[in-house]
Structures are given as structure tokens and as C-alpha cells.
Image (tube, coloured by chain):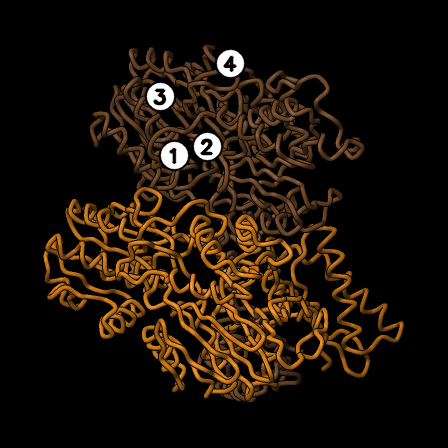
Chain colours: A orange, B brown
Amino acid sequence: MPDVVIDPAPLEPGTLRVIPIGGLGEVGRNMTSYEIDGKILIVDCGVLFPEEHQPGVDLILPDFGFLRERLDDIVGLVLTHGHEDHIGSVPYLLRLRSDIPLIGSTLTLALVEAKLKEHRIQPYSLTVSEGQRERIGPFDLEFVAVNHSIPDALAVAIKTGAGTVLATGDFKMDQLPLDGRLTDLREFARLGEEGVDLFMVDSTNADVPGFTPLERSIGPVLDEVIARAPRRVIVASFSSHVHRVQQVLHAAHQNGRRVALLGRSMVRNMTIAADLGYLRVPEGVLIDYKKARDIPDDRIVYMSTGSQGEPMAVLSRMANRDHEIEIGDGDTVILASSLIPGNENAVYRVIDGLTKLGANVVHKGNAKVHVSGHAAAGELLYCYNILKPKNVLPIHGEYRHLFANAKLAQDTGIPERNTFIGENGTVYDLREGRVRVAGQLDLGFVYVDGSTVGEITDADLKDRRILGEEGFISVIIVVDASTGRIIVGPEIHARGFAEDDAVFEEVKPKISAALLEAAQNGVRDQHGLQQIVRRTMGTWVSRRLRRRPMLVPLVIEA
Amino acid sequence: MPDVVIDPAPLEPGTLRVIPIGGLGEVGRNMTSYEIDGKILIVDCGVLFPEEHQPGVDLILPDFGFLRERLDDIVGLVLTHGHEDHIGSVPYLLRLRSDIPLIGSTLTLALVEAKLKEHRIQPYSLTVSEGQRERIGPFDLEFVAVNHSIPDALAVAIKTGAGTVLATGDFKMDQLPLDGRLTDLREFARLGEEGVDLFMVDSTNADVPGFTPLERSIGPVLDEVIARAPRRVIVASFSSHVHRVQQVLHAAHQNGRRVALLGRSMVRNMTIAADLGYLRVPEGVLIDYKKARDIPDDRIVYMSTGSQGEPMAVLSRMANRDHEIEIGDGDTVILASSLIPGNENAVYRVIDGLTKLGANVVHKGNAKVHVSGHAAAGELLYCYNILKPKNVLPIHGEYRHLFANAKLAQDTGIPERNTFIGENGTVYDLREGRVRVAGQLDLGFVYVDGSTVGEITDADLKDRRILGEEGFISVIIVVDASTGRIIVGPEIHARGFAEDDAVFEEVKPKISAALLEAAQNGVRDQHGLQQIVRRTMGTWVSRRLRRRPMLVPLVIEA
């Protein structure tokens, strides 16, 4: 078990224990474990993308290490849909035990399997679809269609002897979805009639008033922009947004243009989606990227990645003139995507770069080319009123989102004592329709950095922040092993530091003097001498230069 | 002179040379120089705040170093208004020559003087107001009232033998401003009748369609939120936004609450504004912060700084429970401010923290508690149509803003050849109503970091970015000065690096072997040996660990 803040009592037979492992207080790395009678079911296993105070980190995983001792008790991993914040950590969990059965829809599993292939893992999987029921150990699962910004998303009802949980995954309630696949409110109603003891519900847009506009409202805008574009059109979006790409294909087709896919993940995901019938490609519209340059400029649309300003993606490279497609006067670029907080500067740099090269850049800020994939407040109210759950645990969101969602539940009449705002690691026990907070595990961040998982600590990140802000100063001194006399140094080197190296001449005699005094006082061990160097240097650099760089003293015996 | 990209011809008598030094391609550090017949006038001298790729930097100054040789030719520095991006670099320019006359409105000069006092500079200054005319050397100046998010802002018409320039500074065209002081379009019309040869115009909101809402539309919202607040109210805004604070004072007064100012800059600026009559304080409303805690919670409003999530400002400290005002259930926090791109994560962290503590957080995203200080596209069209300038040079903005502004000018009939999109350092010569690009200076970024100005280079920042992302590895070897034999080492130390130090055991023999081979080949100089260490280590770390940390080899002779 991990460090605990409040130790939960041992789980009694017939009680369902629910532990959100990730996705509470953050947007990403969604993961929950459900345990009853010694068996564990997991729902989702996603990644979180790092913020600027986590420099150099590639990904952040849920802190599922406490399951290490319980791997054999895991009866299955349900994946609600194929987005990275729900499936991205699957390879890391399967490294611990590769035969945990994966349970999900056709498209979800296809995307997971493509990802696992890169990690050379061949999973055991069970394909399910809406309406289907499966018994997995002590868990009776029932899958319910939900609408989201990727096709084939599922909510899952988890029925146990202790009660029923409904977990939505990510969803919204588009009433005219492109593929006709609605969030199944009739099924929500039926489950509600039977009684839902705990409703775990997507909070991402709970603080957005009103209703998310229809996905299909974007089509006419794309059509108009493409119709008026004098030369090439480049559309950037998320590489898993099948319906957005569908609308681009349609608008291109209407305007007699062909479409070339750009970017590895775009090509991979859309090939999967087309093969499985989720993307309907009008005859002859898609063209290989290499053949696209033979097509006249006003007959082509490029569908690309990079809508978040990711530096290595196609769009950023175009903006930096580092891509073989050279953007110029008359080209049109459409960012048909959201702007994830934290990415603003990167995205604006891309927009500026493209504008400078002559492109007309169309984005969320100046045209209706994006709608969210998550239910806004108005939709959530429908949900609560149809389902009438006994208890509500808002998931998937920063604290303000969870809080807004709990308020909505309360507005529909669910008592405040039955709405729970938790943290990752909060332990909830469910029995006979009653939810009780049973404990709190101390779950942290597991950082992936290059090939390492969990080796980078918060202390390392603090080091990196100091290094990044102030640089470092190293002080090297070689002393005679027998006499303790200084043979070489102090040699002082600084990098990323604001001052000229010449400034250090002033402190060198102070360091030598401090070491001499220490030697006279009998201090001879390396660690002690290094501490003296650090203290002398630290005092000087803070008083004289008013700075706090990293100090790296090194006393070497020769 | 700085490095030049295109060398401008020597300036002929009777020609006006205009050089934007900062503020083109960026939002901040606005500064322009105007030269005719050997005399130079400067308009504005602001700072730019660093982005995440400029770690550890405090401020960025315009690269005005090329004026060093011409300091005695500067006849004055006009300051259009008191915001940091227009006055923040004044102390750094005055360090070069402290008696450059400052010319500005009463409030602007009061704010500059307070700033200069901290730098222990006593400036020479000339207070001007709208309608006033001043002859400064060869420049006939005329000042025109403009409306902005700080009172007492001025546009300046610069009349010379070569023609007339109108520079707006920052402005919008609120038609019902709180202080009744409109952007003087009648004066714009008169100047237009006389003939404006070059219009230098604020572009910040040129890509925002429509019109900026009235500042006074915020008042009723503040009033309603404060009326319904059960306990304390904390309003955060920019510390120079006199009219926003005015509306808070009014709304508090209406609701029988008193107001305490919080934060050093808020107290300083509002004291100045009240003393000079720009802020009208209702009798008995203001109360000293120290006395505020004696007032019942539902009778107090705190007016504070920190609306951008700045970590040391009052609001962040409250969110982190690091302020003596402990936020709790029933408190209301209003962020009556914009969200400057790049600050999103910091601001959302503050909102989350406050929500978690129990506060109801009201912000731009969920209520109309902010309007911009800059003219949107609709307003700029009015401007162009009333002024009918011969030539237009959009200033104050990223490239996309300048571009959008030039398009607006063209939409009103100004020929494309008479609209100029420039960069910092582009040299424009004006004569007989004709503007011509005469050259391009290579102006860079001047970084302020602690007490140093201009010492941090882009190479240092690149070092910092590498250190911040990947950390560093230092390799220390002590060799015998006479034989070249290794006495101590290789000692390898890493910080901010993702791997455990044990991994380095593998590379140590490789480094020793490489040095031995080098010694046999007669390489003995420190630099050469260090290069060998760097190469050996670099190859290994990149192939084996797929990383690119900073490598710091050090070969010491003893």
C-alpha cells in the first residue's frame, strides 16, 4: 500500500470500494479502481500532459503502484473511449501484468492495440458494444452508448452485490450527432428506475453555462471557408476526432477538392477509423500525401495534426518554414480545435508565423470551427433529472469543475451530503445505497521522462526549475589527500547564470580561507568540506549578487 | 549603430526618420524614435514581460543601445500613458542620460516619477494636457485626449517640416466613459483635414470583431455580485485601472460596505490617483487594511492585485493559504480583469485554490466583469474614416494584430502600398507625404535579470532551457601535470537528470580509455582533453539513454 493519510479499514465482504486513482483535481490520467470480495475492476488508465512547472517531463501516469501487490486480483480493465487521457497509461499497467483483460468498444480497442504494438505488447481483449452485458468476476457490467468527440464511446454500469455504479467516461449530449449515435438517455432512465447508487460523471464543462453546440454546426462554416479559399487549405485538428475529419472530407468533396492526411497519428487513426467503418470516405476523395503536390492548389485540402502548437507537429513546422509544404499568400489554415489552457502562447506563435507567411488563419477566435466534446451545465442537469442517482461523485476535472458539477447535482435535488468532491486516492465504500469516505491514500505523480518511469521525483523537478531559472555554479577544489592543502582551485564555472565569470575572482580567496580554517579545525571529510564551500559561496552569491542559483561544490582528494 | 540588415542611407536634412524600437511583433516594450535635422524625439519606453522560453528573466527592454551615441541629440521623451509597457524602461534609458525631458499628462508623470524614485532618479519633466501644443526642437507636438484602461492617456501629433505623424498610444473609443473624457474624434477630424501623413495606431484588438463594450457595463454586475455576497468580497484587478477601482468603490458604497486596498502597487497607484483627483473616493468608504478586520465580514470589500496569478501577489497567496486573510466558505472573489495569454495555468490554479477554500469565484469566464482597454475592429474603422491618413503603420501588437489592422485600413480605402507592416528596427523615411522603407536595424532583446541588464544572452537562455528540461552531467578528471596520467576520476555528477547516478559506471572506463588514447596521441591541452571527454560522454548518453543534457567536462591538472 502507498503512504496513507487516513488508513481505510479492511474491506468487508459485500462492500464495494471505489478509489479514483487519477482525474480528480486535474484534466487527464483518468483511472478508477473498484473492489469487492477480493476482486478488482479498473475503469480507464490515461495519461496527463505536464505543465510548465514540470519541465522535461513527457507524460504523467496515475500513481497505481499500490496495485502492484494485487495484480492477480484484477479481473479486467474497462476503457470507455480511445483518448489518451483514458488509455495512455495502459502500456505502463500492462508492463506489470500483460494479461489483464482489456474491455472496450471496437474503435477503442483498435486504438489501444495500435498503441500497445509500439510497446510490443499483445493484449487480451474483449470487444463490447452498447446494450451488451458481461459478468467479470463479481462485477455485472452493462455498457451504454455515449456521444463524445471520438466515436464509439461507452459509459459503464457496474452492478455488484453492494449496489450499482454508473461511470460516464467523457460524454456530451449532442442531439443530432453526425453518426446518429446519441448518449442513450432512455437507458439512463431505465438504469435510474432500477436505482443507481453512485453516479460518477464527467465534470470537464460543468462550469460552462448552457449547452454545447451541435458538432454538425461546424460543417457549413468549413464548407464556406473552403469554398472561398483561393489556394490550398490546411485544416488542423486532433488526430482522433473522426467526426471533425468526416466533416472536412465532406466539405472538401462538396467543393471539388481532394484531401491528403498529414502527420503520423492522423494517418494511423484515420486508417483505423476508415477500415472499421467509423469514417466514411467519399469515393476518390483521399489522396496520398506524396501525390498531393501534383494537384492544383485550389483542389487540395491537407488534414493535419498540430492544432495545439506542438513544436514537432506538422503545423508548427509549416509556421517555422521547416516543412516541405511552404505556406504562402492565398493559403488558408483552419484550426478546427479547442485551445487547451497552457498552450496559448505556442498556438499564437503558430498563428503569427502562418499569418506572416501570407496565410489566412481561421480559428475558434474568429469563426465557429470548434465545439467541445463535453457536456455543459445544461446537459448535466438533464442527466441528473433523468437518472436521479442516490449519490454523485463528479470526476474528470480540476477542483472548480468538480465543485460546479456537485452544485448542479444539488440544484436537481440531490442532497449535499450525497454529493462527494474527492481527491485522487480518496477511498469510498458503498453498501446498501450508502457511500462513506473510508480513507485517503497519498497518491502522487509518476513522471515518464524518456525511457524512465517514476525515477524523476518532485525534488528533481525542483532542481530543474532552479537550473532553468538561475543556472548553476560549480566550485571545484583539489586537495592533497595527506596534508589537506589545496593543490588546484577554487575553479569556478557557471552556466545559465546572469553574471560574467570574472565576478567570481572576489569570492575565491574567501573560499580558500574558509577551507584553511576548516582544515585547522580538523574538518577533513569530503562532505564536510563541500558543505563549507557551499555555505561560503551561497552567502556571497546571495548577499553580493542577490541570486539563488544551484551550487555544486566538489572537493576532490588527490 | 547596431548590426544592420539593410543599411539605411544617411538621413537627409528635412526628412523625418521613424524607427519603431519595440512593440512590433509583440505586445509590450513600446518605443519609437523620430529624427529630423539631427534631433531625436522618443515616444514611449516600455517593458515586455518574458514568456516561458525566457526562463528566469525579469523584464525585457527595447534594444535602444544604438541611441547611446546620440544621447545628446534626444530632445524629449513623450509618454502616452502610465502602463508598464509604455513607461517601464524609462529608468533604464535615464540611466544613460538622466536629464532627458519627460513629457506627459499629470497622472502619467506622477506614476513615472514614483517609479523613478525607486531607482533614485529625479527626472526633468514637462506636464501637458489635451489640446496643448509644445515646440520641442524641430518637433511641433500637439496632444489629443484618448480613452484607455488608465485615465489621462494622450495621443500625440508630431508635426515637422517633413510632414505630420499621429501616434495613438493605447486607446479605445468608449462612447460613455466613466470620466466623460472621450477619445477626441473631433480633433482627429481636424488633424485629418490638415493632413496626417503617417498614422501609427494601436493594433492590440484589431483582430477582434465589433466594438469593445462600455466600461460602465461592468458596474451593475459588480453591484449585483456584491449585493448577493454573504461574507467578504475580494476584487482583484490591475493596480493602475483607476476606473475599475472607481466602480468597485461605488458598488461597495451602494451596498454599505467599506473598501480596503491590498498590495503595494494598488495602494501606491490609487493614492496617487486619489490625490490628483482621478479617483473620486466617496466619503468614508476607504479604510486602512489593518482596521478592516474589525469590520463585519458582510461590510467589507478588499481591492487587491494578483489578477494574473502572479505567485507573489496577494491573490495567489490567499489561494495558497499564505496570507493573513484566510479565505473560507461564503467569501466571494471577483477577478475583474483580462486573462493575458500565457497566464492561464497560473490563473486557473488560483481559481481552483480559492474554490477549494470555499470561495465563490466570479471571473470573465462566468460573468461580465471585464472589458478590454483597446479599440476593436469596429472602432478602428471609425478612426480611419474620420482621420483619412495618407499612410498607416500599425503598432503595438503581434504580427497577426498588425496584419489585421492593416487590412482594416485597406478596407476603408487606404491603398495597400500605403500600409506598412514592419518589425522592430525597420527604418521609415517620411518626406512630402511619402513613406519609404529606408533600412532595417537588427534589434534584439535586452534582458533584465536581477541586477544585470543586457548580460543574459539568448545563448544563456538556451543553456537555461536545456538545464531546465534535461539537467546536466559534469565529468571531473584530475590528471598529473607532468605525465598526463589520471590521478582522480572520472567523477560524474548529475542534477535534474532522469537517471540514477549508478548508470554512469558503464561510461567511466570509456572516458578513461579515450583520455589514455588521446595522451598517447600527444593531446595534452585542457581544452582538447575536455572536448574528448565531452564527445565520449555525449555519444554514450545519446545512444544509450537517448538524452541530451548539458555536458560539463572538466580536466584539471594537479
Same subunit, tags 4 and 1: yes
Of the image marks 4 and 1, the number of the one nearer the N terminus: 4
Same subunit, tags 3 and 4: yes
Residue pointed to by mark 1: B205
Name the side, left or right, on which A161 lies relative to B166.
right
For numbered disc 1, what is the local secondary structure? loop
For numbered disc 4, what is the local secondary structure? loop
Three-letter code for the amino acid on which mark 1 is drawn = Asn
Residue pointed to by mark 2: B372
Three-letter code for the amino acid on which mark 4 is drawn = Ser
| In front of the other: A400 or A365 | A400
Q: Nearer the viewer, mark 4 or mark 2?
A: 2
Mark 2–mark 3 Cα distance, whole angstroms, equals 26 Å
Three-letter code for the amino acid on which mark 3 is drawn = Val
Residue pointed to by mark 3: B165
- Where residue B229 appears, as percent x and y from the top left, is 64, 35
> Residue A529 is drawn in which quadrant?
bottom right
Tag 2 and tag 1, C-beta contact below 8 Å: yes
The residue marked by circle 3 belongs to what chain? B
Dot 1: within a 10 Å radius of its alpha carbon, few (fewer than 14), some, or many (20 or more) residues? many
Residue B535 in sight in this render: no
Name the side, left or right, on which B105 lies relative to B27.
right
Of the image marks 3 and 4, the number of the one nearer the N terminus: 4
Q: Nearer the viewer, mark 4 or mark 1?
A: 1
Identify which residue is drawn at 67% across, 18% down: B282
Residue pointed to by mark 4: B129
Q: Residue furthest right?
A: A521
- Where residue A401 appears, as percent x and y from the top left, is 53, 53
Mark 2–mark 1 Cα distance, whole angstroms, equals 9 Å
Tag 4 and tag 2, C-beta contact below 8 Å: no
Q: Nearer the viewer, mark 2 or mark 3?
A: 2
| In front of the other: B193 or B528 | B193
